[in-house]
Amino acid sequence: MSATASSRPNRLLGAGWVAFATVNVAFMYAMPGRETIPFHFVWIGLGLVYGFSQWSRRVMIGSLAAVTISTAAVLVHHADIGAIGWEEITEVPLMALVFLAMVWHVGRRQVALAEVQRLAAMDRRRLEAQQLFVRLCSHELRTPITVARGYTDLIRAAHPDPRTAEDTEIVIDELDKLNRITHRLVTLMQMNETTPPRQVDLDSALARLVHRWEPTAPRDWILDTGLGDARVDTERLETALDCLVENAIKFTAPGGSIAISGHRESHRDGDHVVIAVADSGTGVTPEVAHHLLTGPPGRQTATGTGLGFAIVRTAVQAWNGTVRIGDRPGGGTVITLRFPANGLPAQSAAPRAPAMATG
């Protein structure tokens, strides 16, 4: 008997088991009435070597037959000379049935594992194809968007009448919207790529955020932060906060207020960074908030396609953090990001589901 595994370690394992089984069968024969231990060693060894090797059905049946015949022959001889009772021979078919049951379960497990691997490979190929499609489409869309916008500007300059100006303004707004969607699709794909965190002064980072956005929107900007240093992925954090600030500007009329605040929370599992972006805009309904927190991006809602918030979700979940959408006292929306200050990604931190909530 020998295992037909293709690798040398499996062949050595099979050869070692053959030698081990032969020695124990010899001990069985040499010890009438005391063959129980070597008898079970033979069968246990058969089960172990089958579990660690990959046998064909022919080899498995041959090995089982050899073990059954050899151990049964010894027990029949011992029963014939009166060393044991004839009922002891029933151990052989019982052990054979136990082994066959184990073979059946191993076979089912191998089939299940193969199916899981097939589905995982299919999902991986689908994800890769989806990412490639988004990257290619986003890249290919940028040039015609730029060209169309340029020609629209030329038309508006050549025909300065109010009707043409109004129509071309609509075209430019739609082209700008398409350009933002394209940019966010690329950003969303890049969010899945890991980058190492580094120590950052978050108070300075939030101050720079307000400084960058303040000239672009006539709002009452409020900054209240006491975060200190933390290990974060600065590019992802800046991108996520940009999405939240852009959304706050979109739904807050000129003269309204946008407040950005930050503080630390200490818990048994370590310090956490809490950053909130609050606006005095129109707010969001519970249904829209639920979709932004849990639904897939791309579905058109009153707030847009949700791609910007998908970027926020992807970034915060990668840090094992949470996102919360709430109502601001007096009207408006508060979006709060909470994540560990140690910069550990989700797979390195304690396993727990991200608790996204509304309220």
Image (cartoon, grey):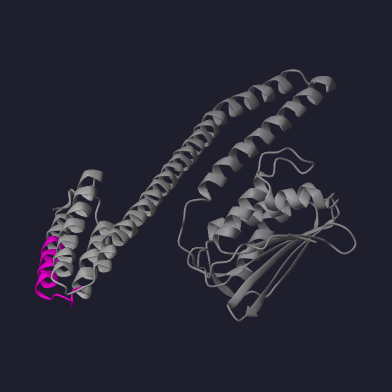
Q: Write down the region rendered in magenta.
A: 17-35
Q: Is residue 29 visible?
A: yes
Q: Residue at x 73, y 56 (%)?
A: 214
Q: Is residue 342 above or below residue 157?
A: below
Q: Is residue 336 left or right of residue 229?
A: right
Q: Quadrant of residue 262?
A: bottom right
- Rendering coords of residue 104 (x, y %): 37, 51
Q: Is residue 226 above or below residue 188?
A: below
Q: Quadrant of residue 222?
A: bottom right
Q: Is residue 232 left or right of residue 15?
A: right
Q: Is residue 230 magenta?
A: no
Q: Residue at x 24, y 55 (%)?
A: 53
- Rendering coords of residue 269 (x, y %): 58, 78
Q: Quadrant of residue 324?
A: bottom right
Question: Image quadrant for the C terminus?
Answer: bottom right
Q: Is residue 149 left or right of residue 24?
A: right
Q: Main secondary structure of the magenta part?
A: helix
- Rendering coords of residue 68 (x, y %): 21, 57
Q: Nearer the viewer, residue 35 or 341?
A: 35
Q: Residue furthest right?
A: 330
